[in-house]
Image: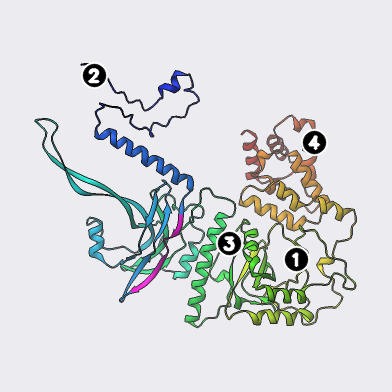
Amino acid sequence: MMMSNTLFKPTGNQVVEAIGLERIADVDPRLTRSHYFDSRLLTAKDLNRDQGYLDGRLREIGQALGYGVIDGLGLQIVDDNGVIKVQVTPGLAISQAGRVLELTKSLRLDLTATADITEFNGGAYRRIERALYALVIKYSEEGTDVAEAFPADLVSERRVEFDVMTEGVRLALVRLPQPYGQQSEIALRANLLGEWLGDPTAGGIVGEEAVGLGVLAIASGRLQWLDSELLRQPLRAITRPGDVQADLSRRYDNLLKTLLQQRPLSSLTNDFAATDYFRLLPPVGLLPQAAINPVAGRQGYFPQHFNVWITPVRRSDLEQVRADSMTLPPINLNSREPADIIVVVPLNNADYGRMAQLLEKPANEPGTLPLSLDLLRLRLFPVHNIDTDQATWQQIWDSLASNQTLHYIRRPLRAAETRLSSITLARGVPLPANPPASLPSPADTGLYRDEASIFLREINLYGLTGLRAPQGTEEEEAAMKLRENYDTHVAITRLVAQALILIERQYDSILYRSLWELLTASNVAGGDLPRLIALLQTDEARAKATGTAIAEAVAADEFKLSSALVTAWSDLAGS
């Protein structure tokens, strides 16, 4: 009787090769399965291969769905009969490896139970050292029950193996490299706000089979504090614009709520400056009501050089207002560059309808022009008139709950003109008691339909930077400076439009920083930007790569750019 040979070929496919398609086929040798037929001898290797195949396919589905927490898995500190424990609620998550991690019941972790910790870790840990730790949920596989393996020949011996491999999840602490200093809880958590943004694995420390649920601090074997938002990420297949800012916003809001609870315990008011605790703020977030006083025209939360407005919004519109600004860059409180901030006061529909009518600036007010309908002109916020609006804002403030948190947004690049009055606030500086009656509103400036206004209505820096979106945070900041400083300059807008036409998209990573440096190179209108435009229109420059032509012109002292940008232009020219 002849025996047939069973071949296992992990790197090819006979059918594909037979028809000559091997060069376009995509065969993954890791995802192979056994071919079953009658009279075939099966071994553990064959069955394990099939288990690996099914496991790989299931993890592919998980990876397609994304990475992060789907539902639940919340963390909180509880007092269990005098013992402080960390409670993890039931929930579901998917790891980077595609593992579905499900916790079906609440678990309470006693970090002081040294005997249990020693047992669970095979004696490796007798106590938890002082440090910062990530609390993670991770995939676990344990062998259970007993199965006897009989010898296959006369020389082998019987042996015992696990009968069943049981899959599940376990909770673990992963030590973080960030030092646990002597600062207060709030200071430490504030310093960690900007850590791991866009990288919930903390540089790979969490592991691809695990998902981070939060960060806790341990000293002297005891839990000091817990942050349930650090390292946590909602399920996300790909990172979209605004996702990183949303993570920062959740972390900040969570920390601010803790801060507002702790300050009164130390006999401190909640009227404080953000710089007392934070260096970085999300573009959208909460702020304490006590730091804002629209009746007196004062705010004490943001730096003095920031431009701050306040306006009511419908509570039902609040999430959309927040979403519109969520994609903007975070706010660096240490930067000397001013930022535009709008404090929004959410009201119910009835209160909003009544207050909005009182705050609305009449379009036919004597001595004023009709309000512009151009939705891109962000400078057209009506000016607060303290003689007529003070009582209205007092009513709005009286309707708010005591110590209610307000919302702020970084001014979006494109915002609709609502015709609602906004109060310009300056840190610690009240508005004049009797402003001049003849003071014109900024909303009435530059709205005559002359040639310049018509041009800017159709072509403006907001529209141009929207069509040619900045690449990266530094580019976004440079584009914002262009808009804030030159949004009403027709000549500058024409120059920028010409530059965008002449410069290829491969240079977008340094485009707006270069334009800003050229515009501010001298006190002459347009700076060195006209020289760049003239250069790029020459036949000699057209015969070269744009980056090469610009680098050579800077070397010839035709105009100036920083050495870092010149190097980048040269590098991108050769790419």
**Quadrant for the C terminus in the image:** top right
Q: Nearer the viewer, residue 434 or 121?
A: 121
Tell me the colour scheme of the image: rainbow
Give the magenta-colored segment's residue range.
69-79
Q: In the image, is 151 to the left or to the right of 536?
A: left
Nearest to the eye among marks 3 and 1: give it: 1
User: Under tag 2, what secondary structure?
Assistant: loop
Residues under labels 1 and 4: Cα distance? 43 Å
Q: Residue furthest top?
A: 1
Q: Do the numbered discs 4 and 2 sit on residues whose CB atoms are within 8 Å?
A: no
Instruction: Residue 157: tell me if it is visible.
Output: yes
Q: Earlier in the sequence, mark 4 or mark 2?
A: 2
Nearest to the eye among marks 4 and 3: give it: 3
The quadrant in which residue 285 appears is: bottom right
Residue flagged by tag 3: what amino acid is it? Answer: Pro
Residues under labels 3 and 2: Cα distance? 71 Å
Residue 86 x/y as whole percent: 36, 67
User: Under tag 3, what secondary structure?
Assistant: loop
Which residue is identified by label 1? Answer: 418
Residue flagged by tag 2: what amino acid is it? Answer: Met
Which residue is identified by label 4? Answer: 537
Nearest to the eye among marks 1 and 2: give it: 2
Residue lying at 48% horizontally and 52% vertically, measured from the top left: 199
Residue 247 x/y as whole percent: 53, 58
Q: Do the numbered discs 3 and 2 sit on residues whose CB atoms are within 8 Å?
A: no
